[in-house]
Image (cartoon, rainbow, N blue to C red):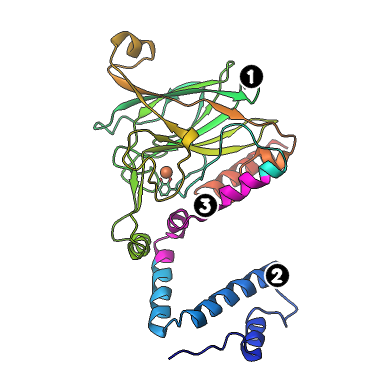
Amino acid sequence: MTVKIFDTPEVQDFLKAVSGFDQDGGNERAKQVIHRLLSDLYRLIDDYDVTPEEFWSAVSVLNALGQGTQFGLLSPGLGFDHYLDMRMDAADEQARLNGGTPRTIEGPLYVAGAPELQGSGRMDDGADTDAETMWLTGQVRDTDGQPIAGARVEVWHADSKGGYSFFDPSQSEYNLRRTIVTDAEGRYAVRSIIPSGYGCPPDSPTQQVLDLLGRHGQRPAHIHYFISAPGYKHLTTQINLAGDPYTFDDFAYATREELVVEGKRIEDAAEAEQRGLEGPFTEVVFDIELARTDDPELQHRHKRPRAKEDEQDRASQQAGTAKV
Ligand code: MBD
Ligand code: FE
């Protein structure tokens, strides 16, 4: 049975009513966006003859995604995060704000309020005894190669099982999450552990959707960064470690050629001692270049719901109030 009713006045009027066009209240932008979204979906149902069974199974998947707070995981899997990056890249190009280390997606696993280190320190709590020691270091510079002292380098990554503290309750608070303030030479250097790649839980609704597309849900080993300094454009990025089977086959599409870093295994005891390490380790070097901007809006990460971010805001606002 094939029917085509989308273009009838009845359906078009119905869409306007559903979108609140005949109502005074509500939000104009929301009305426009939802009207377009519903129109596209209604048309899809008509064009593809979507059956009630198919429709309700989609509703059930959406319920499961919401129940498991997995929309933030399916989103990079369906390329939305990377698509937003592509749009920001294009906007930067248009405004001649490009240059510096490329951005890539934030992902859903950031937690605000990690402990702060001055120049260097340790990110892991020592509990992950299977893991290879990592020495993660680099210099933050401007696009002319001048070091930026006092830049804030926020780093977060997974453990040797691919789990992130906070989301993996077996890890200690803020394990593998730190904010490092660069030293006078713009450098940061931390001891941590080499992360493993991440895999979507096999029985999750996200993986269920990926299965329908014949796709895996794996990410290569990677390390997330937020980098900011007054007068410079905030940078959200990641490095992907070379040699992982998924380095160039990331389900979240975050890999960029310039962001693939090869770890260097160092076995020399003197080199280890120099860094305060006991044994062999892998050094990962990531230098970062920030583009200048006077626009204060661009100097901070964009707003988005993030774990513990509201608490942090409230805490700093309260601290601010307490001072006056
Ligand atoms: C991750 O660690 C991640 O960075 C993304 C984008 C999605 C799932 C897990
Ligand atoms: Fe990640």
SS at badge 3? helix
Can residue 54 be seen in the rendering of this structure? yes
Q: Amino acid at mark 1?
A: Gln
Residue range corresponding to the magenta coloring: 65-91
* Nearest the eye: 29 or 8: 8
Q: Residues within 10 Å of mark 3 (few under 14, many from 20)?
A: many
Instruction: Give the distance between the C-alpha atoms of the residues marked 2 and 3, in whole angstroms.
Output: 25 Å
Q: Position of residue 266 (x, y in %)?
A: 31, 17
For mark 1, what is the residue? 146
Q: Which disc number belongs to residue 184?
A: none
Q: Position of residue 271 (x, y in %)?
A: 35, 11
Q: Earlier in the sequence, mark 3 or mark 1?
A: 3
Instruction: Give the distance between the C-alpha atoms of the residues marked 1 and 2, in whole angstroms.
Output: 46 Å
Q: Earlier in the sequence, mark 2 or mark 3?
A: 2
Can residue 303 be seen in the rendering of this structure? no
Q: Residue at x 48, y 39 (%)?
A: 256
For mark 3, what is the residue? 81
Q: Amino acid at mark 3?
A: Asp
Instruction: Give the distance between the C-alpha atoms of the residues marked 3 and 1, in whole angstroms.
Output: 31 Å
Assign the magenta stretch its main secondary structure. Answer: helix
Q: Answer whether residue 251 is magenta in the image.
A: no
Q: Quadrant of residue 245?
A: top left
Above or below, 270 relative to 204:
above
Cβ of mark 3 under 8 Å from ligand 1: the answer is yes
SS at badge 1? loop
